[in-house]
Amino acid sequence: MALLDPHPALKVAAPESPMIDGWMGDDWYHYGAFRQTNLDYFSGQTARKGSGTRIPREHYDDYTNFLEAGSAGAYALANGFEQLPWWKRFAAHPAYDAFWQLQALDKLLVARPSSVPTMWLQGMWDQEDIYGAVHAWEALEKAGHGANNHLVIGPWWHSQINRDGWNMGPLRWPGNTTAQFRQQVMIPWFNHYLRDTPLATPLAQAMIYNPVQERWDSFSDWKAASDQKLTPLYLQENMGLGFQQPAGGSDSYVSDPARPVPYLPRPIPQANDRWRTWLVADQRFVVDRPDVLSYVTPVLTETVKIQGAPIADIFARTTGTDGDFVVKLIDVYPAIDPTDPTMGGYLLPVALDIFRGRYRESFSDPSPIPANEVQEYKFRLPTANYEFRPGHRIMVQIQSSLFPLYDRNPQSYVPNILFAKPSDYHKATVTIEHGAGGRSAVLLPVVSSR
């Protein structure tokens, strides 16, 4: 916020995991799907001066708590949220209308650009604000303000830059990545602008960690997502995945709101130590569920290197009139890993996100999904700088819920999902097309591995 019409004393800035657009992909929503566990944050921030309390729980497992409550709105009202002005304003604007659009800081920054040297910092697996920094940087770069704006994406969870950075969940680095970055990059950069000390090396346009090579990569020409060259990785018959055109076919699953797919293995308590690293959790815990489709390539013989934001491009039909689509891009580790046996067969998410189907044509003007008609659901996944190595495989998982982190879609169209009634929730058969009805794919920003 300080970068909008900055005070003359502001000489340099480093927004860390900034919340830039709360509806599109930061704290509150992801493409229209509500992050309902943040209701604790609502009460903590607004229920009283100072610090409010979290919502009391009846059960240890939040999966049960939110399932029994029904909708997110029912849960909020049962806990007295009608007293909180923020909740009332929030609940009245479920779509991306002017209420949200006028808060989108990437657009405000472009409209009122500053000359302050700025380092946009975020984690590659930021579980809270994975959208903001990279979108702010991309917007400024495309508007011609790249000279004083730099992008940094580290192998971190939300704001881990302020803490130790030896590992990201099971992924261990050869040093303390956060301390090294602060000492070797951030402090010299601050000192250059605050104390006029020389910089041994100018800060690159983008610095993005390569978690496979376990090193920082610097880029002078990092591309915004809209300028990427993309290579389709197609869903294939027999649950295959490949770069060749698919032969045809489709696959179906039944999405049941009474039994949503959890985002972590249960139980999922309110105070959840796994929250920081859930984006790298081993996805084998859902791979055998009948409502999760897992497409996988043959064992790779060459490295597949991606630099940028993958795009999910899913063609699907559903028996419902609304529905969510979760797409995960996953690195399948070899069955045996002699260097680290605990990683044998690990299904590591590289990038994943959720999209609410009613917004397939417009984020501001939702519409029912025509039942049993093929529709296209196209949305961006988080930015990656990653290498799928020989001996590994690539997997794409598709499902319709990530519960209880995101509220359940009733799969029947209602004006405001926050207040869906119990009678609105219905099973739906979801069919993913990979033939004449539509060639579903994840579009990858593949670059040469040489």
Image (tube, rainbow, N blue to C red):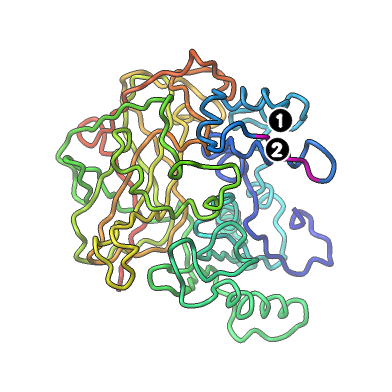
Q: Which x, y percent locates residue 277?
A: 50, 55
Magenta region: 51-56
Q: Residues within 10 Å of mark 2 (few under 14, many from 20)?
A: some
* 87 within the magenta span: no
Q: Which x, y percent locates residue 377?
A: 39, 35
Q: Residues within 10 Å of mark 1 (few under 14, many from 20)?
A: some
Q: Is residue 295 left or right of residue 330?
A: left
Classify 380 as above or below 147: above
Q: Nearer the viewer, residue 339 or 30?
A: 339
Q: Is residue 130 left or right of residue 429?
A: right
Q: Which residue is mark 1?
A: 87
Residue drawn where x is 45% and y is 45% of the image: 264
Q: Nearer the viewer, residue 170 or 4?
A: 170
Secondary structure mostly seen in the magenta stretch: loop
Q: Nearer the viewer, residue 113 or 261?
A: 261
Per the model, the C-alpha gap separating discs 1 and 2 is 7 Å
> Do callouts 1 and 2 mark residues in contact (Cβ within 8 Å)?
yes
Classify 396 as above or below 194: above
User: Which label is found at residue 42?
Assistant: 2
Q: Amino acid at mark 2?
A: Phe
Task: Indicate which disc, 1 or 2, sits on the residue closer to the N terminus.
Answer: 2
In the displayed orientation, state which residue is furthest to the left: 247
* Quarter assignment of residue 360: top left
Counting labels gives 2
Residue drawn where x is 74% and y is 57% of the image: 3
Residue drawn where x is 35% and y is 22% of the image: 428
Q: Which x, y percent locates residue 72?
A: 59, 27
Q: Amino acid at mark 1?
A: Trp
Quadrant in which the C terminus is drawn: bottom left
Residue 130 visible? The answer is no
Residue drawn where x is 18% and y is 33% of the image: 249
* 52 within the magenta span: yes
